[in-house]
Amino acid sequence: MAENTKISNNITDNQKKIEETFSNCHDLLIYSWQYGPELKYRAFSVYLGTLVQNKQTNYMKESMQDLVSHEVGPATEITVKDVINFFSHHGVSDQNALLVERFDDAVTKILSGHIVIFFDEWEKALAYNDLSVNKRQVTEPATESVVKGPRESTIEQLDLNIGLLRVRLQNPRFKMEKLKTGGETKTEIAFGYLDGKVDQETLAEFKRRLDYVKESEILETGYIEQLIEDSSASPFPQYRYTERPDVAVAAILQGKIVVLVQGTGSILICPGLFTEFFQSSEDYYQRSLFSSLIKIIRIISFYIAFTLPSFYIALTTFHTELIPTNLLMAIIDTREGLPLPAFLEALIMVFFFELLREAGIRLPQPIGSAIAIVGGLIIGDAAITANITSPMMVIIVALTGIASFSLPQYDIAIAIRILQLPMMILAAMLGGFGIMIFFLILFLHLVNLRSLGQPYLSPLSPLRPKQLLDVFIRRPQKWMSSSNQK
């Protein structure tokens, strides 16, 4: 890293330090030029060609001379004293330019897509922002598709993402603060909140935890989540992610803090409560009756994805008397001749299902979807034919997977996948009693879990009756509007 010293007034020393700092950097471009009477004054501009696509750097020299000529006459009469006097006392007229005094600041500007101009006999430099890296266009979110509602997605450009939020929340109380991380990456981070709506204690705690982030290497919002989360050992996500500006703005209006990082389109929403992982932005774009029905289906799907394999193992191993006689006879008939107990059978099928799911995600999309469908059909049919598993177990695992796909937040589905195995082990060892023990431990964990200091199960625990109505069903829009007015 460059030395934390002031810029020298000797242009030769400055150029030598630049070349030493960026040694072995093939994309560093330095252009030297002269100006003033008989071109006796020297200057040089430096930038990274991979960040600045505009190769016509002379326009800055010309624009600078034109600016100064308004004060001293023809551009050929400019002296170093005129340059220093104009830019020091009149300021920088170009909105993309600024003065830098320290050498490490100049290096930082070069690395962030600026063109920096050094002048002989002046211990300052001009930095022009000319970043022109190709960027992805705003498109429809890939992970949060909706039938009804906005279809804009955030991209990897921080300022553009902030603009998408500003367009939807045109309020001076919407604060957006920026900072840069230390280390090697110098990643730019921004966090926003609605002043007067956000809880001040939560905001203070969030800023305190950002101290861990400032000295870390940050490439994505997931890095920040891991640094500021309350419990790293918990399988449950303590913060939400979104790529939708409308979801981020809705969270800000609820008093949440949103975190954006340069180079990624994911927005981190803090804090994230357990009940919020069952919400979708589309819930508030549909009529309340339909949205409430869909939300109930999601909650049922969560319990199906979480408990169905374990309940099947417990019932078929320990509690066969609870199964209706006709269904029990059908299960016994399908399991006749199988060499493996229900637990190992379920474990093998769940493993192959997870394998197919990962293969479908990692492979190119046209191939991945075909592999997931064809592979599931072939493996399921082959496993039944080879008497490795029963048709009932294939149905159980398929229903479990489909139920997990219905959850709007991917992170909560990951928590289900992690907790399935210990729950299945307890169900195979102790039956229904083992499932009860598992849920008791799980509830104790959730009750004690915090997200940015807030109770994770709120408003269920601690109980907040006024907010309960919007947990299981969605309140009509008229009720929400009237409550906001009050």
Image: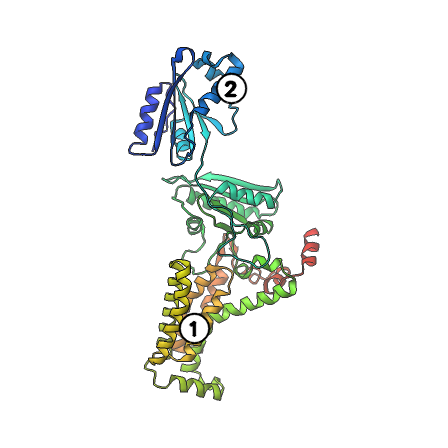
Q: Work out whether residue 218 or residue 270 is closer to the camera in this orientation and state it.
A: 218
* Residue 250 can be seen, yes or no: yes
Which amino acid, mark 2? Answer: Leu
Q: Earlier in the sequence, mark 1 or mark 2?
A: 2
Q: For mark 2, give the secondary structure.
A: helix
**245 lies above or below 366:** above
Which amino acid, mark 1? Answer: Val
Using a 10 Å C-alpha cutoff, classify the residue at mark 1 as few (fewer than 14 neighbours), some (14 to 19) or many (20 or more): many
Q: Work out whether residue 386 or residue 419 is closer to the camera in this orientation and state it.
A: 386
* Residue 418 can be seen, yes or no: no
Horizontal side of 398 relative to 388 (left or right) equals right
Q: Which mark is residue 67?
A: 2
Image coords of residue 150 (percent x, y): 58, 52
| Distance from the alpha carbon under mark 1 to that under mark 2 | 72 Å
Q: Work out whether residue 290 or residue 381 is closer to the camera in this orientation and state it.
A: 381
From the image, tell me which residue sits under label 1.
Answer: 397
Direction left: furthest residue: 24
**17 lies above or below 377:** above
